[in-house]
Amino acid sequence: MQKRFYPLYEIVVIDDGSGDATSLRLIEAFQMAELKRPIQRQIKCKWEQAVYEAKVNHIPLTLIRKENGGKADTLNMGINASRYPYFICMDADSVLQRDSLKEIIKPILENDKVIASGGLVCISNCAELEDGRLVKYRMPWNPIVGVQIKEYDCSFLAARMMLDKFNGNLI
């Protein structure tokens, strides 16, 4: 059995009114069951249409389907639905290194004045993973997509460098 680095975590997927079959594929792939789980509303967000849950390798997996409300509304739903005090958000087109969660929590655990921590999130276009590790990353062959990724990386890096001067963090 593989050692788990994060004994208390869950995965929450929010379907923000998408028109594709992603939710159906997730439900089928992980044999998720629909249930009536109450979501505590600490932050305003649109109401859930359905909640599904499953355990994958003993890790709780929750899928919440809701009416489209945009990114902020979706993040609010994720915060409301999460069972643990720390919340990490990422988009479906992003990938984290295998030890990212362990590394990102260190500043918070080491200093009680730290309330947020962030890292570099790579867009997963053309990323190759093996056993949860990023083994190869290249720019896509489509030049427009490549320019978009480069612009994203540069703008985030510049904003983070500037905010670091003020002891801030772009999350």
Image (cartoon, rainbow, N blue to C red):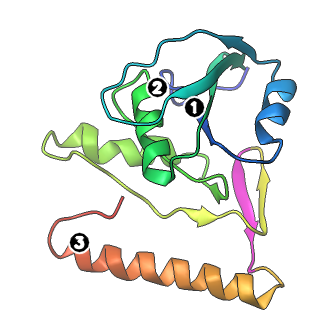
The answer to which of marks 2 and 1 sits earlier in the sequence is: 1
The amino acid marked with disc number 1 is: Val
Quadrant of res 146: bottom right
Give the magenta part as a residue range.
Answer: 132-139
Which amino acid lies under the numbered mark 3 shown in the image of this protein? Asp
Position of the C terminus, as image quadrant, is bottom left
Instruction: For marks 2 and 1, give the CA distance.
Output: 8 Å
Callouts 2 and 1 close, C-beta under 8 Å: yes
Q: Nearer the viewer, residue 31 or 85?
A: 31
Q: Is residue 4 visible?
A: no
Q: Residue at x 39, y 24 (%)?
A: 84
Q: Name the residue beneath numbered marker 2.
A: 81
Mark 1 lies on a secondary structure that is strand
Q: Quadrant of the N terminus?
A: top right
Q: Is residue 109 left or right of residue 153?
A: left
In this orientation, which residue lies closer to the viewer: 14 or 103? Answer: 14
- In the rendered structure, the answer to whether residue 69 lies left or right of residue 170 reads right
In the rendered image of this protein, does residue 170 appear above or below residue 108? below
Residue that numbered label 1 is attached to: 12
119 up-or-down from 14: above or below:
below
Dot label at residue 164: 3
Q: Secondary structure at mark 3?
A: helix
Measuring from the top left, give residue 38's x and y in whole percent. Answer: 48, 12
- The disc, 3 or 2, on the residue closer to the chain's N-terminal end is 2
Marks 3 and 2, Cα distance to the nearest angstrom?
A: 31 Å
